[in-house]
Structure formats: structure tokens, C-alpha cells
Image (cartoon, grey):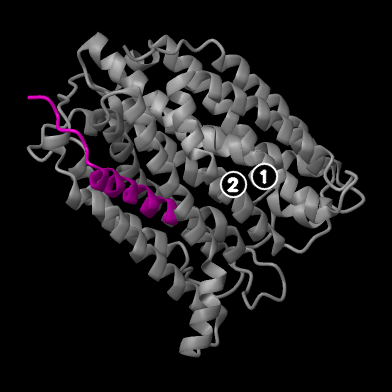
Amino acid sequence: MPAAKLTLGKELAYACGMVGWSIMTNLVIVVMHYFYLPPSNTGLVQLIPQLLIFNVVNILSVVDVSGRLVDAFYDPIIASLSDRSNSRKGRRIPFMKWALVPAVFFCCLIFYPPVHGVSTNNAIWLGVTMALFFMGITTYIIPYNALLPEMAENSAEKVKLSSFQQAGFVLGIILAALVNNDADLVQHIFHVTDRITAMQYTIWSLCILAGLFMLIPILAIDERKYTASKPAHRPIMQAIRQTFKNRNFKYYLVSDFTFYISLSIVSSGLLYFVKVLLDQPESIGGELMGAMVGCSLLFYPLINYLSKKIGKKPLVLIAFGMQSLVFVLIFFLGKLPMSPPAQGFLLSISTAFPLAALGILPNAILAEIAQIDAKETGENREGMFFAVKYFFVKLGQTFGFALFAFLTIYGINRGHDFGLRLNGICGCILCLAALLFFSRFKEEKDK
């Protein structure tokens, strides 16, 4: 029996899951470093020793990379289990249901170190809780993303559902970025004097909110009604090898991997760009993020329209080209003939279209790759395709963080900032490489 089409309400319910896991993953990305190694005069205390390993990276960076690598190697395992599931309730939703509580619980525990002060025990605690959190959230994310190609029948539906996903992801970023603002309210309303306690209360509230968002697709979507795929039967290593035989997927994968390296080295330096290259207070970073996100949302209808008219591949190539120019702009920040805030907003607005296009289209493209592969091979391995993608995303992020740490030796202070400017050049080269690889991708047109 063919699968029923999603109503608008079901599409929005599906996107709610993205809001939830975006809140938690971005709490770790945005807040964790600030929480454990805070700037002075913040009301927080340093919790991890600032020791350099090989004079290049600090302990916190090693812990962060280790947690991501554990998660990356766990991805194919959960994907294989999901693809091969014979559960009467569906292949994906049961995994999402059981992942919900551990993801929320361990995300909160990340921000509850055992020692209220500088201690290597806190570093060990952080490494363990981060690994457990990433395993929990991955158990939700991989099956969740694998539902997209199973529930969206054609290219237009995939782009539409991916657009709702990306809007949910952006909303999650915004909610996670408001931690300090929310902590101010907690201190003011509930008369909490300790800043760390106020932040912990806020994080608990946001994690519970994230869990409720993640619960919505579990309750609202009957997987048996809206999907018609069958379990795969290949063992995990055979499934991985078969996935890599897909020629289109390999070009997609290399371009995605290269792009995430570039994105990571620049996201690592965002506050440095504001403070050092533009000589502006860190608070302007929130305004720049708001401008970038707001402008990117305006491009969503255009991207949906153009993807139907000219296809997704040309839009992705245009986005890679524009993003490479944005990285060149980073190299010249603070030297352009306009005020520093104007340079910052120019950077944010220029990033809006690439952010929208590269947020919406890659998941829709991967959903099509998985769907076409299922027709050709007779096996539904959507989970494995998304698992391999996220494995390489996390490897790309890991290499990006390491590259940023390496570039800092060439200068990260005002008057000695060449290391920061090199981030722009490296990002430009990597985006051009992504464009080159993706130009070999062959897009299938809907008949």
C-alpha cells in the first residue's frame, strides 16, 4: 500500500523535532566553552585548566574533538540498526523515542561538573558526559533524518520538508544563543545570586523544552502510515561498502566534508573576528547572528521556487561560490573603507543566501540519492546514507577545529592577527574545492 502524503500540520510536527535537537546541540556548541573557560568579570569561575598540548591545542579542544569522534564512529551503528529494524511500530520512531530521555539528561549533566573550580576531574567529567550526550542525540538524529526521503515522494516535497527542517534548526540556534539573557532573568526574578546556578537552571529549562519539541514528531507521525519502505538485511560493513559504491554520493560526500572543514575553522574564530579584526565588543556578535539568520529566512521561498525551475545543483554551486567570496571578505575585515560595524553587517548579510541554500538543499539532495539507490538496489538504507554523511560532517568539524588551533600560532591579537586572517583564505580555498567536487555531481530531474 502506498504511503499517505503528509499534511502541513504533519510537516510542521516533523520540523519540531529539528527545533529540539538543534537547541541541545547548539547549547553544547555555543555555551560549553564559555561555561568551562569563561572570560573574566562574567560571574563564572574557570573549571578546566588552560594547559596546552604540544603547544597547539588546549585540554578543552581535545575533549571536544574526542566527544565528536566517539559520536562519529557510533553513527553507522545506529544507522544499521535502524535500517534493519523489523519493529511493528516502524524503523525510525522507536529509536527516536528511546533516545529522548538520555539525550536530555546527559546534555544537562555536561553543565554539572563535580568540582566548583579548576580541576582535571572536570575535564574527565566533560569528556564522558559529552560522549554519552552525543550518542543519545545521534540515536535520535540519524533515524529522524532518515524519515525525510521516506515521507517526501518527489523533489519539490523534499525541498519543502527540508526547508521546514532548516527553519526549525535556526529557531533552535536562536533559543540556545539566549542562555545568558535567560540566566539574567532567572537571577532577577528568583533572586539567584550564583551565576553558575542561574545558567544551570536555564539549561535545564531549555533541555526540557527541547525534549518536548523532540516528542512532537514521535506522537504526531504514524510511521507505518506515512512510509512504505522495507527493512534492509545487509550487515553493517556490507551496508557501508554498498553505500560508498554510489558514485553521486561520493561527490556529494567530499564536497560536504570540505565545506564543513571551512565552516568549522571560521565558526571557531567568530568572536575573534568581532573583537580583534573589527575591534568591537563581543555583544555585537548576537546582532550579527540575528541579521544573518533573519536575512537567510527571506531567501527560503526563493530557494524553493528556483530549485523547481533550475534544479538544486546550480543553487548549491552558486552558494559555494558566494561563500568563498565571504571568506575572502574575512581576510580584509577591519581594512575596508567603511565603519567596523558596517563591515560586520556586510559579512552577515553576504552569508545569508549561502546559509539558506546550504541549509536546505543538501538534505533534500541526499534524500533523493537514498531514494534512487533504494529503487536500484531494492534495499532501503536511508539511515546509513545519513549516518555516513554525519560521520564525515563530524570529521570535517574535527579537522576544522584542529586547523583553527594550528593557525592561531600565526597571530590572534590586535596588531598581530595574521593567523585569524588566514582562516578566511583557508575557508575560501576549501569552498572552491567543495564547488569543484560538487560540479561532478549528476542531478536527477523529476519526471
Say which residue appears at 68% left-offset and 46% top-offset.
348
Quadrant hosting residue 382: top left
- The magenta region covers 1-24
- Callout 1: SS: helix
- Callout 2: SS: helix
Residue 8 forms part of the magenta stretch: yes
Vertical order, 21 against 432 (above or below) = below
Pointer 2 residue: 295
Q: Position of residue 72 (x, y in %)?
A: 43, 36
Q: Are marks 1 and 2 in contact (CB under 8 Å)?
A: yes
Quarter of the figure that contains the C terminus? top left
Pointer 1 residue: 349
Vertical order, 196 against 141 (above or below) = below
Q: Position of residue 147 (x, y in %)?
A: 27, 35
Residue 60 forms part of the magenta stretch: no
CA gap between label 1 and label 2 equals 7 Å
Position of residue 107 in the picture relative to residue 60 (left or right): left
